[in-house]
Image: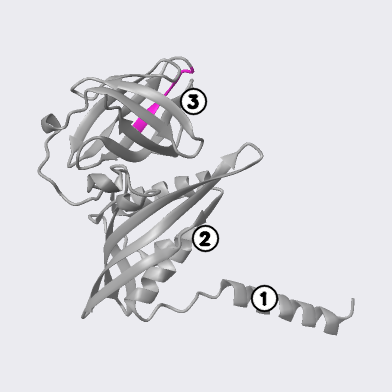
Amino acid sequence: MNASRCTVWISLALCIITVTTAPASEPTDPESAIRRLVRANAEKDLPTLSHMMAHDADIISYGVAGRKYIGWPELEQGMKEEFLNAQKLEIPIKELKVWTKGDLAWYAMELDYIRYVADGSGLKQTVLPMRETGVLERRAGRWQLLSWHESFRSAQLNGPLTSPSSGSSIHTSENTQTPSAIDLIGEWDIIEVEDDKRYKATFDKNGNGPYTQHGGRFTTTTITNRLWQGTWHQPGNDREGGFEVLLSEDGTQAKGIWWYTRVGTQRNIPPREHGGTYHWKKVTR
């Protein structure tokens, strides 16, 4: 190989390295920063997320299913687990509104969090309609996300959970209902939305009872503002996990998710790994 050709190839290689590793320009406004963060999340780009999120030790953020993150290390670990678990992510933004005052900005956003996980030889898609609020601060000339709070856009979880004639639907606003005022007693139809599997559950006044899948049993832990949370156990196939559903205002329907915490002797399952979406409906006679 002659020296001139070698020099050209080395120069070209150095040029390619420089281009591919050069940092992207900083977003100049908070909306651009938010959209960059969402795109980085969808692309599983942890370095960009780390660069654009504040690492203050006392920052608190809230995710769905009761997740709470204090400081960057907890959030980073959660994202690493999610990125390993999901084969592919798509996060289209449906609505985004941003307000700015000086070096502070805050936003309200609606988006779809679309996960693809391995399912046999293919991929299983799960669409989680979300809404999110958060606060950004401009530090040393660049916008950084300080804190955020996300929840399910429950009214749009695959359509309304009550019939049009009932006049009620699921939403996330506060209400004055207390657990004791919610009548859970009786038989419920449970549909696993992704696979269209159907079960029957029978609950007592505390939200505990058996269901028709591998001798399963539900145990309620909390009901707060219609958010119904608890655990499930299936001795027939030696599995257990948790669930979280949101009750309709009349307490006759619910929609939410479930996840595994143990499968046989396997316990190293990522926290709250999404297992499926439920639609619950109380049987009236």
User: What residue did someone put label 2 on?
Assistant: 43
Query: Looking at the rendered structure, which numbered label has been put on residue 16?
Result: 1
Three-letter code for the amino acid on which mark 1 is drawn: Ile
Query: Looking at the rendered structure, which numbered label has been put on residue 266?
Result: 3
Q: Position of residue 69 (x, y in %)?
A: 29, 49
Q: Position of residue 123 (x, y in %)?
A: 59, 44
183 part of magenta stretch: no
What segment is highlighted magenta in the picture? 237-242
Predominant SS along the magenta part: strand
239 part of magenta stretch: yes
Give the distance between the C-alpha atoms of the residues marked 2 and 1, in whole angstroms.
21 Å
Which one is in front, 28 or 212? 212
Q: Residue at x 23, y 29 (%)?
A: 221
Which residue sits furthest left? 176
Quadrant, the C terminus: top left
Mark 2 vs mark 1: which is more N-terminal? 1
